[in-house]
Every structure is written in C-alpha cells, then in structure tokens.
Image: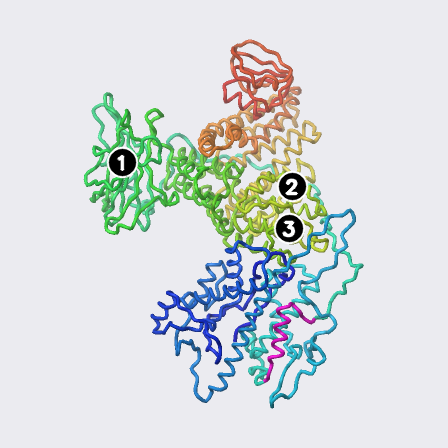
Amino acid sequence: MVPSAAVALGVAGAGGAYPARVVGARGTRPVCAPAPTGTKRVLVRTRAWSETAKSNNVNSNDVDVSNVVIPEDLVGIRAYVRWENAGMPEETTPEWQATEYAGALLDLRMEVLGGVSLNEIRRRYNQPEVPGDDEPMSFENMKNNVVQVHSETSADARESEQQRSNEANARAAEEELAARVAAAASAKPPPPTPATTEPLKTEPFKPAIVINTQVANTASKPKASGSKKQAKSKKEKNGGKTLTSVAEVVIPEDLVDIRAYVRWEDAGKPEDTPPDWQATENAMARLDLQIEVLEGASLNAIRAKFKEPGVDGDDTPPYDGWDVSDALAQAKNNLANNVVDVTPLTKPTKKDEPEEWVEPPPEVVGTYLEHHERDVRSLMPGPDCSLAEGTASQAKPKKQQSFVSRWSLLDNDPSAPVPASGGATELIARRVYPLEGDGELLVQMYVTSGPNAVPTRRIVFTTDVVDPLMLHWGVSRDEPGQWILPIKALWPASTTPVSEISVETKFVTGEACLGNDGECATLQTLSVDLPGSGADELTGVQFVLRDEANGDLWYKDSTNGMSNFRANFLASTQTQGASDPLLDAITRAEDPHGGWWTLMHRFNLASNLLDMHCTQANQPNRLAAYQNASKAYVWLRYSASKKLTWQRNYNVKPRELSAAQSKLTRVITNMFCESPYLRDTARLMLGCVGKGGSGGDGQAIRDEILNIMHRNGIGENKKYWMEQWHQKLHNNTTPDDIVICEAYIAYLKADCAIETYWRVLLEGGIDRARLESYERPIITEPINHGANLKVPLIKDFYKYLTILKSVHSGADLVESIRACAGGLGGVSDALNYVRVAQSGGGDATQLLNACVESRHQLREAGLADASDDEWTRNLLYLDLAIDDVARRAVERAGEANYGLDDQMRLAGLVLENLALSLPASNQDVVLATIDWRLAIQSRKTGDPQWALRAKAAMDRARLAISRYSDTVSQEMQPAARHIGGACEIEQWSVDLFSEEVIRGGPAFALSLVLTRLDPLLRAEADMGAWQIISPKSVTGFVLHVNDLHTVMNDVFARPTIVVADKVGGDEEFPLGAVAVLTTCSVDVLSHTAVRARNGGGGVAA
C-alpha cells in the first residue's frame, strides 16, 4: 500500500506557478511492488542501475521502474528543484506541471534503482532523516525483470493478481492527484486591493479549502457529501458489497485527533489559529485516514503507525472484500480539489470586523532607590593582566605540549645561522602549524647581520610527520603572494625544478632531543637562505608540503582556508623584521576583487587566526597577543559596520552561519577566560559578532519564514516583497534581517504606511540601494495583504524577530536575560528595573544605579573568575547589553536639570561603570573612583576643601580616559589604515576609526558627565575658568575667529594660535595651527581634542 499524501494547507490560490510541495508519509522505504498484469512497463537502461543490478545478479535490460515507491514529500521537493532549474517560470499550464511532477518522480526512482538510499536524498535536500531509510533498495527475489517483495504460492495467485491490480490503480490515482495538486497551487492570487482612505471591508478568515457547510460530520455516523444517488452507499453488486460514499467510512475520534496534530506539526506548529482553521484541519485529517482505510489499511495498522495500542477486532481492514473504488475515487477527488465536509464553527457575516492590533501597555517603571556602595578596589586587575614589554604567559605543562612546540622554545636551535665575527642573529618569527593527522610544522625565521656583511635571511622548516616529505616552494620579491623560481645558488641539496615558478626539496630526517629532559623524537628539517638586501633581495617563501610516498597527498595551511603557506620578511627599505602574518591573512581573504566570500567564511577564518595569534599556547608573549587581538577587533568592527562585504558569490545556509558565529564567540570567550590581559579587547570583539547558536537556531530562520507565509496564505511569488525577502533569507541571512523585520512590523502596525517602513530601515542604516545590492535583491515594497492578516502577521513576525535576534544580536537585553536567568537564580530587582526602564522610562540616575548593581552581580556570578566558557559567554553578552543601557542612561541624564549633588552622584556611577567595562586596564579609573567618593564624603562633612578634592579626582579621571584614548589610537589606527587601504574602505571611515571606537564606548559617557560638571566645580573651588584639554607649550601668531569651523580646513604657513569664540568639538584641528583657545567648554574626547593630542597641538577652554 502506498501511504496517501496530505496536501499542504495554503497552496490553493497561492501566487507563483511552481509545483506545490506535498507533505507525504514519513519513514517509507523504497519498495518495489509486483507489476500488475497488463501494466505498461517503463524500461530503464542506466549505467548506475546496470552496475547495481549486475552486482546483485539481476538482469537490468527491462525493469518496471513504476513499481518503486518514493515518499511524496521528496517528490514535491524534487519537482520544486526542477522548476527552479527551469528558470522559475511563472505562467505554467497544469499539463506542464503534471509532466514536471512525473519527471521528478522518475528522477528519484532512477536514483533509488541506482543504489541511493532515501536518507541520502533527504540529506542532499537538507531534510530530516528518517530511521530505517539508510539502506538502499533490496534486490531479493527478482524474477523476469520485475522486482517482487513477496514470494507467492500457486493457491494465492488469483487473489494476489487482484491485489496487484488494485495497487496499480491506487498508484495511478495518486500520481494524478499530485498533478492536480500542482495545478491547484499554480492559481494566481487576485491583485492587491489599492489603498483607500476608508478601512478595507474584507471577508473574515477563510481557509484555502472548499468547505461544504450544509452537512454536519460526526464521528459516530458521518453523512455523505455526494448526491442522493451516492447516499445509497451499500448495495449488492455481482454478489459482493459496494461502498460508494467516503462519508460512510467511520474513523475513531482519537485517531483523527492524532492525525490532526501531525498535520499541525507539519504546518510549523502555528499558534493563535482561528476556529475555522482548526475545524478544517480536523476534517482534512479525517479524510486522510478515510483514504488509508479505503486503500486497505486496518484501524490497528494506523494505530501502530502512531504508536498507539491496538483495539480488539480492528486488525482486519473494515472493507476487506468490498468494492470501494467509487468511494476511493470520490475521496481522492475531494483531496485533490480541497473539498471537505465540516460544520462551520463561526458564521461569517458582513458585520464581522477584522481583529485590531492593540499595543501592549508599557510596564510601570517604578523606582529603584537601593544603593549598594561596593568596594571598588576588588575591581583592580591583578598581575595576570600586565602587558609589560616581553611579559610571557605561563606555559602549559609539558605533557600538554607537543614535541614540536617544545622544540620551538629551545634557545640553542642547531639550525639557526651562525653570524660572522661581531655580527648577530635574531629570531624574527616562529610559528607552529597543525598538519592533517597528528603532525605539526614549525617555521622559524632568522635575520643575520654583521658590521661589514650583507644581511642574510634564513627560514628553517621542522616537522614530526613520519612519512618523507618534499618542500614545494618558490620565492617572492615584490609582494607576499609571488611565486618566483629561485636561482640555483639558493637551492639546498636534493632540490629539483618542477615548474617555471617552483622547485621541490627533500627534507632531511634526523633525531632531536630536548636538552636535559632526555626526550627524543625523529624530525624532518630543511633550511632555505635568502639574500636580505640589494638588487637580489628576496622577501619570503611561498610553499606547500607533499608526501613523497603518496604524491597526491598535499599539506596546506589549514588555519587560513587551506591556502599556501607563507613565510615573509619586510623589505629592507622598511623596518627590519617579519611581515605581519595576521594582517596579511586578513587582507588576502578580504580582497574586494576576489572570488567568493561571506560572513561565515570571515567568522571561521577569525576563529582560526585568533587561536593562532592570541592564545597562550601559540603566542605566549602578552603584549604581542594583545596587539594581535586589537588588529582582529579592527577587522571585526569593520565587518559589523558594513564596511566589508557580507556576501559575494556564495550562498550560505543560516544554520552554517549560525554555527560559524557560535564557534567564533566561543573562541573569544575562551580568550577572556584563559588570558585576563585580553579581557578588554575580548569584550569589544563580542560586541561585533552575534551570539549564533546550534544548527537548529540558524535553520529556524530558513524554515519559519516559509511557515509564516503558508499559515497566512501568502504565495511564494517572486514579484512580491515577502518572497524576495524569503529568498534573501534562504540564500544568506545577515544582521540586516533584524532591521528589515522591525521595519515590516512597524509598517503593519502603521496600517501599512510605506513611509514608516522606509523610516525604520533608514534608522537601521539600510537604504534602497543596499536592499537591491543583495545577491537575492529586494526590489519591491511590502503590500497590504488585507486587514484580516494584519494582526496574525504582527504576532508571527514578533516571534520571528526573536529568532533573528537569537542568532544575529547576542547583546539583546531581553534575550540575554532569558539565557542567564536560570543560572543567576532568577532576575534581581536591579536587573528587572534595567529591563523595564531600558526604553526610556524612569529616572536616568536610578537606571544607571540599577545597571551598575546588575553588572556587579554578573561579575560575582562568574565574570570575576571566569572559567566556564559557555556560562561566561552568556554573562558577557548580558553585561554588554546592560552596558549599552547604561550609556543611553547617561545621554538621557544630560537632558535632566540635576543639581550639584545629583551631578556628582551621577559622575561616581559613571566612573564605576567604566571600571567594570575595562576589567584588564582600569587601575587609574578605580583610583579616581576612590578619590571621587572621598570628595563626596568631605562635602557631606563640611570640609571647605571638598571642591578642590573633587576637582583633583576629576582631573585624574580625565587623565585616565585620555590615556585610554591614546592607547586605542596607537594600537588600532595603524591596523585600521592597513586593512582599510587594502579593502578600499572610504578614507573618512579609516581616519575616524579609533575616534569612533572611543566615542561609542563608556569612556565617552564619562567624558560627557565631567564636561557638564567641570564649570560647577570650578565655581565651588573658586578656580580659574581655564581647562587644559591638550597640554602643550607653544609660540605662534594669534588669529581671532568667530567659529573654528570657518578655518578648520585652512593651512597656515606660519605657527598660528587660533582664538575662537565658538568650538563645537567636531571640527578638524587646522594644519599649521599650534594651539586653539576658546571660551566654550570642550570635551576631552571630542574630535577636535583627539586630533590635537594626536597631532601635538594644544587646546585650552
């Protein structure tokens, strides 16, 4: 028996003309049934089938392929793929669709005959596997070129012949059914109703199924839906019983309910479904089971399929021996035309109004008056956060390190070059690469110099691979990627040319021992010497490794996308040393003129590069690891700000992107846990990458948008906005989709006002050009799908927005609270106040107080002594979300009319919040916070010098954030220029990179508060009005201007001191100017102040 196919709801009347996807029975293995007498055979002769048949001793000349049963869901998917391959034609005829469907069925049957299992086909189409479907079709008992599944005796031959005929008729009917379903799916929807000034008068919810509402359908005695002639259903005909109406087939209600539940699961588990939809689904479930019974299934067989206990007396098919052909044909006709009998649960009338969206009332914010003054000295970083020059992290125990890694740490490397008298040898770089299997490759780069000698360069290769290896290599002169044939004078022994640009050299095998440890191992080594200056200067070697015994086995750089290995020095005209391998790897991968590239590839490469350049195992020097982490952050921030491509010539499944994000965030979290000196940078990097998740989280992005469309009867027509977005999501989902979803929700809530859609998009940084730039572009605008769908779509897309944020926006406050609430033992009063007041309610100081208290709680819950990577990751994302709320609270506080006491309390909270945001470098901020608290206490006790104490603490805080600003600029701006230039990023974005990092962080919030407070403290302390923003002793000619804007682009030929009546802080520091003096209050982190400090100019206000 072939299980019946259930038609997916919502296809009738849907837009588009591709074959409908049909939901079929699960767990159906490919079966070859005996061919009925008189059936026309389909003859196949394919190489795959012939070879498979030959291996099973079967004659493959003439085989009846029509007897191979394929689950309908796979046929529907294959038909869809054929439609896509045909160019996705829109206006197709039912005959064309039926032909395509039959072609899809034949495609899959041929694959099954060729030995492919059903689960292999499912994996190709990214469908869930079904237990028991991993084995290919059995070839037992093949006789007369017809595959048989049961051996028959001569006594049963006549009965079996009749059964074969019935099954053949059933299969023919089902193939006809599939074609009719496809035809129904091609019906085009009516054009959208034009917008009017009056509310649309649309009909209430109507399922995409024809409903006969004149007849009630009960479980005990169903009534016929046919004519009066069909009502007389049981009659004697040729001595047997005949059934002519499907309505007479009684199905127990418990089975109907189970089948309806399965249909609900297949539809994506929609919530808030209307009563009519539920009643229709129930009737369709009953029809599914009635068809199975008419095809010969017993009720207990159906119960067994649903894993339900059997019932006595239900083992025999109810209509065994009956003529049910008329009833079965009627049932399948009803299924093909979506006609069921159901009692309407609601009576649509013209008076029914569509449901209106009611915005949930905001929660009452209330107040947060608790104050917990904690000992901020506990926030001070320990010695494990030191970045002193040359500081090395504690190495792993020897038993955790490989022999090659320990060999790389030896001071007396026997392969190092020996300098001439008076000369020196310097190890420029060393790196251990993993090789496939258990082997590793050590690359060491030396420079040798002498008083009267030409500098030379040596690259030493060492590996513990057992099989003999060949170094396949070429040299570079002008750029790192060159392959140039080295001259013979540079060839080591056992070198032979293999092409016009490369040679191969055999490694030398020997034994190496680790000093006093006594441990020895067999290693293969090889050295290549290069001239280090002059006309013959060479800058590096490009290479791969080849297994000499197995010539087809090659070793490449698995840490950089299986590219060639590179060992490059800087040119002699540059500062001596090795070229930066981290920046080289980034810029090579991000080449804007390269081939395919996506966020997934970027995140996977970032995971590998961080592991190689920042972890203690591979980079024990803390300062070098910190500098590498800063470069990686520059790269990730460029990506997050859309300065680097998110997709180019490559399609990524959402689950693959989600998994890549998850892997990267776990690598960063591990850096936070294992390397405390990298915690500041690790927090910054996490803010640039969505949290990601398991494959299921990403797959939900792909699946749920289609479920929403089907639930609401929205056709998959590429002319419409939602289908274009669906294709974009299917092809490559990105963080842009959060903004698109928010814009569509706002559009629906605004009664489909298109200007609202564009406003939200532009606020999120997405314009029409960006929408049209996607590989699957969005070129149309959303349309009104009717008042009845407004509220269901809003509810559906709010839930979909949660899915998008769970993958792309790890620092979403609500989602982060949900992820951490269990581990925190619930949501504290402080954290709950942050959640409720984040959108603008309540007092800004109370909100900031709650943020600081919540962050202390997270620190005590695991961030202070981070060890569990997964728990730390969740806590860090929640901490980042709270920090963002705190920053917005400070901006709101600037609009409040606070007195001096409130301003000082606010400044203390902002100082404490900054200390929590810089766990690895907050010494000066913590000390300034302690001084600030003492100043507040002295004011309370009446100390006349309190204002001077407060001013001194303020100056200390300003100095701390100025140093932080300078550090960010020194460590990140060179990498920003390098990556920006190589990737053709706009020059203004490159120039302002470090400033944007500073101004987007908590240090800038503190600077704003101190700027507002400074005049008040000066007045209280009776101090002068001048504030030194950028200290500098200068001499020059004085120029008075009304506004610095008027001269900021001028170039002064002589040293000039500009006296400006107005300075906003966003002006450029004029070239040739040595100082700017103004009567305006200028922020210490303003653009003008930062430019002046970086350029050596003075600023006083």
Residue 445 coordinates in the image, percent (x, y)? 30, 34
Query: What kind of residue is marked 1?
Result: Leu
Q: Residue at x 47, y 73 (%)?
A: 67
Residue range (magenta): 322-341
Q: Report if residue 340 lies within the magenta region.
A: yes
Give the quadrant of the C terminus.
top right
Labelled disc at residue 760 = 2
Is 1036 in front, or is 599? 599
Q: Is residue 24 left or right of residue 31?
A: right
Earlier in the chain: of badge 1 and badge 3, it is 1
Specify whether 47 is left or right of 899. Answer: left
Q: Residues within 10 Å of mark 2 (few under 14, many from 20)?
A: many
Q: Quadrant of residue 343?
A: bottom right
- Between circles 1 and 3, the one closer to the viewer is 1
Distance of mark 1 from mark 2, alpha carbons? 57 Å
Q: Are marks 1 and 2 in contact (CB under 8 Å)?
A: no
Distance between mark 1 and mark 3 Cα atoms: 61 Å
The residue pinned by badge 3 equals 798
Q: Earlier in the sequence, mark 3 or mark 2?
A: 2
Q: Amino acid at mark 2?
A: Val
Q: Position of residue 880 (x, y in %)?
A: 56, 41
Can you give x and y, in whole percent of width and height, for residue 775 in the image? 52, 45
Which residue is label 1 attached to?
A: 485
Coloration mode: rainbow
Q: Is residue 868 visible?
A: no
- What amino acid is labelled 3 in the image? Tyr
Residue beneath the point at 66% across and 24% down: 942
First in sequence: mark 1 or mark 2? Answer: 1
Circle 3 crowding by C-alpha within 10 Å: few under 14, some 14–19, many from 20: some
Q: Secondary structure at mark 2?
A: helix
Q: What's the CA distance linking mark 3 and mark 2?
A: 15 Å
